[in-house]
Image (cartoon, coloured by chain):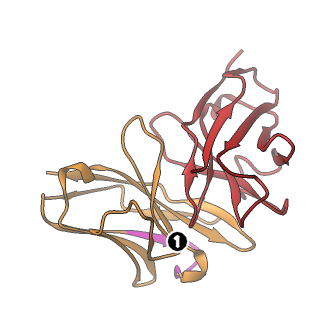
Chain colours: A orange, B red
Amino acid sequence: QTVVTQEPSLTVSPGGTVTLTCASSSGAVTSGHFPNWFQQKPGQAPRALIYSTDNKHSWTPARFSGSLLGGKAALTLSGVQPEDEADYYCLLYYGSGQGVFGGGTKLTVL
Amino acid sequence: QVQLQESGPGLVKPSQTLSLTCTVSGGSLTSGDFYWSWIRQPAGKGLEWIGRISTRGRTNYSPSPSLKSRVSISVDTSRNQFSLKLSSVTAADTAVYYCATLGANDFWGQGTLVTVSS
């Protein structure tokens, strides 16, 4: 069974830059995995930030960007704001369309 | 704007079948190139992708051993709804269940808590 791995936790200072990554146990992550990134705040449903590697939704703040980096999917936050403190999840698709979420990254802004 | 709303029993007994429905409003279940998905989240834990069905009725299910062969997703176009059935449930299936579309068109329901307990 494929496992998708994210950093369990990261800490960043306000105004700083942080990169969250998403790795696949089956090998390098490519655009063919259609990486999605989601943000979830306590008590709320997740909300998508990025789809298909680097595409933003209309509501995605400009400081969020998606990419492929060193065989992983990556979500970079530039100019972090206090309201960015949340859990972040990546989602990859395999084969004919089976999805697997990563375990999530708890981002602390401190 | 598409809106999704989950509904179904909040309490299911062990070994029974969990059945949830997602009602779609503000858009047709059969229009566009959507995938209608189910995701769950146990309390304090991460998201788990359960499966999806396309507007053309094609299904994909999670390969996870915890779900494999127990999941069925279907659509009722006359009611603009899609449904999840999870058989032989145990306490490990206790979670908040979300219906959603994912990808370029991303909409989520608010989620519904399903508890498996006798």
Q: Mark 1 — residue?
A: A35
Q: In the figure, is residue B45 to the left or right of B80?
A: left
Residue drawn at 17 percent across, 66 percent down: A79
Image mark 1: chain: A
Q: Is residue B64 visible?
A: no
Residue A75 on image: x %, y %: 36, 70
- Residue range corresponding to the magenta coloring: A21-29
What's the residue type where badge 1 is placed? Pro
Of residues A24 and A38, the one nearer the viewer is A38
Q: Secondary structure at mark 1?
A: loop
Decide: is B13 above or below A53: above
Q: Is residue A23 magenta?
A: yes
Residue A108 on image: x %, y %: 23, 51
Q: Is residue B39 magenta?
A: no
Residue drawn at 57 percent across, 36 percent down: B111
Quarter of the figure with the N terminus of chain A? bottom right
Of residues B44 and B34, the one nearer the viewer is B34
Mark count: 1
Of residues B86 and A34, the one nearer the viewer is A34
Residue B14 on image: x %, y %: 76, 24
Q: In the figure, is residue A38 to the left or right of B80?
A: left
Mark 1, residues whose alpha carbon is within 10 Å: few (<14), some, or many (≥20)? Answer: many
Q: Is residue B57 visible?
A: yes
